[in-house]
Image (tube, rainbow, N blue to C red):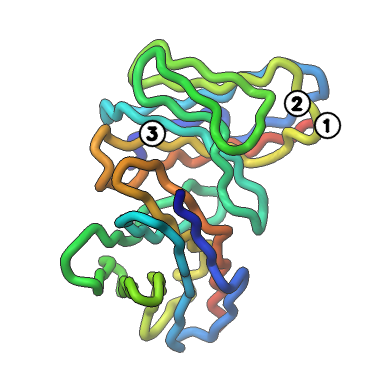
Amino acid sequence: EADIYQTPRYLVIGTGKKITLECSQTMGHDKMYWYQQDPGMELHLIHYSYGVNSTEKGDLSSESTVSRIRTEHFPLTLESARPSHTSQYLCASRPGWTDNGYTFGSGTRLTVV
Amino acid sequence: AQSVTQLDSQVPVFEEAPVELRCNYSSSVSVYLFWYVQYPNQGLQLLLKYLSGSTLVESINGFEAEFNKSQTSFHLRKPSVHISDTAEYFCAVSGINNDMRFGAGTRLTVKP
């Protein structure tokens, strides 16, 4: 049973729309991450957070923004969606100590038309 | 900083045959190593991990991986695969104080 939840699972949206991808975890993990996944490519880190009110940009330049007002919630927002944003977005979390792997959500597959 | 190279993007194999998915990493510090599996339309699930101690680690579904420090490798193996093992497999590395870096993935396709 998943302890980290992403909604929606699938989203088709028109160019220029504002969208928010939701990610929530019930494990009390401090660290949370957003990855962008394209076929045949490595996972690209786009945002991460080490705790409430802490957010950082990842390696991959992204036009998205994130917030971390509560430990369990880490939403990702695109102010104006473009076809280049079409991808799968994966949310993950881990405890504060580093010898555990990540727990991943099921992902949101976004298509911008 | 760490990096991961998965040497094969696709590995087709027949059912009940052995398989090896190759992973090499680079790092200037001690690392933790992981293999994740991703089934279609799902997120990644942790398959196994190496933190310290025995260099051979096993998963509950018959996969094993061996940490080889001199060759900076962490190859994943299974002596006999099933159709249900068809999935994408990701190797990942994490330093003591760093977050995780993932490889590009290897698509394992098991054919009847």
Mark earlier in primary sequence (3, 2) = 3
The amino acid at mark 2 is: Ile
Residue A37, above or below A94: below
Image point (41%, 18%), residue name: A54
Cβ atoms under marks 3 and 2 closer than 8 Å: no
**C-alpha gap between disc 2 and disc 1:** 6 Å
**Residue B71 in picture, x, y percent from top left:** 40, 76
**Label 1 in the same subunit as label 3:** yes
Quarter location, residue B19? bottom left
The amino acid at mark 1 is: Val
Image point (42%, 42%), residue name: A104
Q: Which mark is residue B68?
A: none
The chain under label 3 reads A
Q: Nearer the viewer, residue B103 or A19?
A: B103
> Would you name the residue on which mark 3 appears?
A4
The amino acid at mark 3 is: Ile
- Quadrant for the C terminus of chain A in the image: top right
Q: Which mark is residue A113?
A: 1
> Would you name the residue on which mark 2 appears?
A13
Q: Can residue B57 be seen from the camera position used here?
A: yes
Quarter location, residue A39? bottom right
Q: Nearer the viewer, residue B99 or B79?
A: B99
